[in-house]
Each structure stands twice: as C-alpha cells, then as structure tokens.
Amino acid sequence: MQWNKLSFSEQLGNIGSEISRANYWARKNDIKSRNNSLVRALDLIDQTLTVATGHSKLRELTRLREVLADFLAEQNSYKVSLDLLEQYCLPFAILARS
C-alpha cells in the first residue's frame, strides 16, 4: 500500500489506529510497546505531512504531531490523554470506511 494513494481521512484513520494501539499497551502497563506505537504514529504523521496539501491539513497535522511528541516525551504540556487522542482520530477512521 502506498501511503500517498490513501485519502487524508484514511491516513488519519491509520494514525488513529496506532494511537489506539498505544492506548491498549498503556492500559497493559507496557510502556515500551506504547512508545513504539506512538513513534509509529509520529512516523505516519511525518509521511502524511510530505504529501498533505492545504493550509488547514498542514496545521491539523503539525498540531497533532506536536501534541503526540509532547505526550511521548512525558511532558504532557497539553494535558491530553490517549483516550482523548483516540477519540479525536475516530471520526476520520469512520469517514474513511464510509
């Protein structure tokens, strides 16, 4: 599957899947697996940024990347949870499937 062939919603849905995996591992107290999933989500965001067009998409992606990186660095300046990040990405996954 070529990443740039997916729609923006499909890309964000896949990013959301990695966040969901991270949340799963966090609940199991497996920090290494949680962090691996977050790193994969950041990688997918970076791939999306290389093909994204439009100011609003770029702003959305860079903010999501900033929040995820902050969470991964255990700063959590934005006071978000993985549950909240998962909920944020869920509508994109639903849209991609419709």
Image: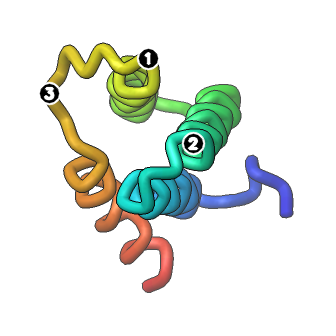
**Place of residue 23 in the rendered image (x, y in percent of width and height, measured from the top left):** 39, 56
At a point 30% along the width and 66% down the height, the residue shown is: 91
At a point 36% along the width and 20% down the height, the residue shown is: 74
The mark nearer the N terminus, 3 or 2, is: 2
Colour pattern of the rendering: rainbow
Q: Can residue 8 be seen in this view?
A: no
Q: Quadrant of the C terminus?
A: bottom left
- Disc 1 residue type? Ala
- Disc 3 residue type? Lys
- Disc 2 element: helix
- Disc 1 element: loop
**Depicted 70 relative to depicted 84: above or below:** above
**For mark 2, what is the residue?**
41
- Which of labels 2 and 1 is toward the front? 1
Quarter of the image holding residue 14? bottom right
**Place of residue 62 in the rendered image (x, y in percent of width and height, measured from the top left):** 43, 22
Label 3: how many Cα within 10 Å (few below 14, some 14–19, many 20+): few
Quarter of the image holding residue 87? bottom left
Q: Are marks 3 and 2 in contact (CB under 8 Å)?
A: no
- Disc 2 residue type? Ala
The mark nearer the N terminus, 3 or 1, is: 1
Q: Are marks 3 and 1 in contact (CB under 8 Å)?
A: no
**Depicted 12 relative to depicted 65: above or below:** below
**Place of residue 61 in the rendered image (x, y in percent of width and height, measured from the top left):** 43, 31
Is 75 placed left or right of 39 in the picture? left
Mark-to-mark CA distance, 2 and 1:
14 Å
- Please identify the residue farthest to the left as the structure is shown: 79
**For mark 3, what is the residue?**
79
